[in-house]
Amino acid sequence: TNSSVSMEAKPKLLVLYASQTGNSVDAAERLCREAERRGCPATVMSTHDYEARCLASEENVIFVVSTTGQGEPPDSMKAFWLYLRRRHLSHQWLRGVQYAVFGLGDSRYPQFNFVAKKLDKRLSDLGAEPIAERGLGNEQHSSGYESVLDPWMFSLWNTLYQKNLKFFPNGPLLSISDKKLIDQPKIEITFYDAVGGHSEYSNTTDLKCFEMEINRARSMPPGKFSHYKNSPDCFLQMIVNCPLTRAGCGKDVCHFEFEALSSSIKYEVGDVLEILPGQSPAAIDRFIKRCCLNPESYITVTPCNMEEYLLLFLWVQVQPREAQIGSCVNSSMVAVKLKAFVELTMDVASASPSRYFFEVMSFFASSEKEKEELQRFASPEGRDDLFKFNQRERRTVLEILEHYTSVQMPFEWLVQLVPPLKTRAYSISSSLLAFPNQVHLTVSIASWTTPSKTQRTGLCSGWLAGLDPRERVLIPAWFRKGSLPPPQPSLPLILIGPGTGCASFHGYVEERALQRSYSLTAPVLFFFGCQNEENDYLYRDFWFSHSQKDGVLSEEMGGGFYVAFSRDQQQKVYVQHKMQEQSTKILDLLSKGAAVYVAGSSKNMPSDVLSAFEEIVCNEAGIPMEDAVKWLRELGKAGKYHVEAWS
């Protein structure tokens, strides 16, 4: 071990990531790994877990950040970003801090890599010195974000080495011998026999038993999941599974209704429900058999780096009491059945693994042909081929393991590298006031065909669509706030929600209809859009009933319901066209203090809708376009223009 003096003299890197889907985590871990291979100590951490006020005491920080929706930071970065935006921070606050920013984005969307660009500018404004020009990865590139990450990273190492030779004692390039060495897994797994495995569950209900199992399993893998709320808020049972689109029309949208089993539930309209999807029992069995594991054994998972473990322990101690419930420190020492661990934490039959997965596989391949192919995939030269084979095809871990039959990876590596089983978030489409102890969802069943003509289905949406309400399937669920705040009954609303963007507004209309029965409510204008009246007109009867005389959406009450069918005529008609037709009514409601809510696809719709509002204000109010743009911007600052968009 180096002495404290030599450690102080040796520069080190901090890699902070902000991820929504997991790509930023993979990129950050790769940066950390490549730095350590070159002899530079590096720490990787989520911005969610990092204390932003400590940033000024760092020396060398690499940020890896993704952009979500309409140029928004990932949820895990929002608190960190709010701190950086504080007005009291001086222009010299980060003086002495060197940084680099790598962004992950998708050029199909208008706000391409917006978060990386904003972060780069803010860090510079606060006095930090850029080590290298920011890198902007693009998911639309033929080989994904790594096409930019690879050259950016090598340039970064060269720049760091030029600034201080101590970063990399043996230089910034890896030797051939370095590339033949495998890292050590970061976790240690202890196996136990099945004796006494369920002793703590003997006096508990099935629900409580399942809750404890979820909590323990998802608390074990260090850094895989949020430290908050590993235990579900409740368990749901499906009571209605109803298709909303015509069979065979090319779109598959369902209405799901759930009843809470475990406890009373609390949510507001505009909130989001997160669901932990079930995995195919056959796929789980195939994975366990392929990996030569005993499904009946019990395991505990602990980090090899106990210093990191103790830091996590200290972090948990300073959190509010509710955040400590289910913390990894309190739970990970209790063994969990191996099969349950795989089911609840490892996405074996849906998500595609990272490039590093192939690199590690190569060390455990006994076939020379497979070893060579895996090594090529892991190399910079084979990057494009790997992207076509893996990411473009969305191959699963199970498919890859079954393809490379000579590979026998230790379970430690599998736990570390198999993508984590993530919760899926859906906008709630019901009102708790209208349906006590229930929650409803409007879900598009994701399905697509890969370049090799393989049919894929979204893990969670496909699982939900296949559930039979007559079966008592326990669905772990969490509630969280969405981007659309619940409006007061007296607030006029202009809602724009094409496709499944109408989900939250279904709940809004339900709630306002109930409020109207005992108090005065403000008008609601709703613009809905779909392709065809006969195919995907979601909730047609519901909207129609509420737009009749004295209904929440009725013109008699100052509101209105307008629908755009984009494919039912030769010229495409979208929600923004219907808005233009009602420009007088829109400006009238805006002048009365209406709030605007926009929900749906993040590709073009939100920006097209904003442009329509700007044109309406410009033309109807008779003011210059620049003033109309400014007026809409002020509406957003006042908390009256809300957007919830997804890719």
Image (cartoon, rainbow, N blue to C red):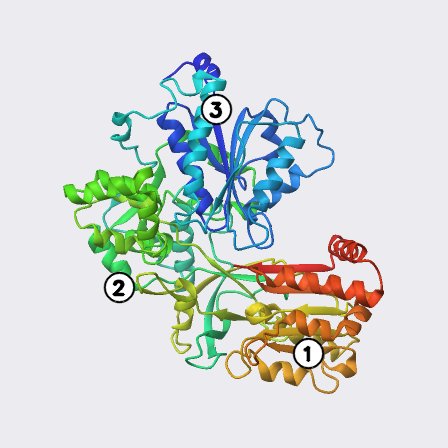
Secondary element at image label 1: strand
Q: Is residue 113 left or right of residue 618?
A: left
How far apart, in angstroms, are the residues tagged by discs 2 and 1? 46 Å
Figure quadrant of residue 98: top right
**Whether label 2 touches label 1, CB < 8 Å:** no
Classed neighbour count for the residue bearing mark 2: other residues with Cα under 10 Å, few (<14), some (14–19), many (≥20):
few
Q: Position of residue 416 (x, y in %)?
A: 34, 43
* Residue sitting nearer the eye, 239 or 611: 611
The furthest residue to the left: 367
Residue marked by disc 2: 282
Q: Position of residue 520 (x, y in %)?
A: 80, 76
The amino acid pointed to by label 2 is: Ala
* Residue sitting nearer the eye, 246 or 546: 246
Q: Is residue 167 left or right of residue 87?
A: left
Q: Is residue 109 above or below residue 7?
A: below
Disc number lying in front (2 or 1): 1
Classed neighbour count for the residue bearing mark 1: other residues with Cα under 10 Å, few (<14), some (14–19), many (≥20):
some
Q: Looking at the image, is mark 2 or mark 3 earlier in the sequence? A: 3
The furthest residue to the right: 622
How far apart, in angstroms, are the residues tagged by discs 1 and 3? 59 Å
Classed neighbour count for the residue bearing mark 3: other residues with Cα under 10 Å, few (<14), some (14–19), many (≥20):
some
Q: Looking at the image, is mark 1 or mark 3 earlier in the sequence? A: 3
Q: Look at the image and tell me in which quarter the N terminus lies.
A: top left
Q: Which mark is residue 561?
A: 1
Q: Position of residue 487 (x, y in %)?
A: 72, 65
* Residue sitting nearer the eye, 322 or 90: 90
- Residue 522 appears in view: no
Q: Which mark is residue 500?
A: none
Residue marked by disc 3: 159
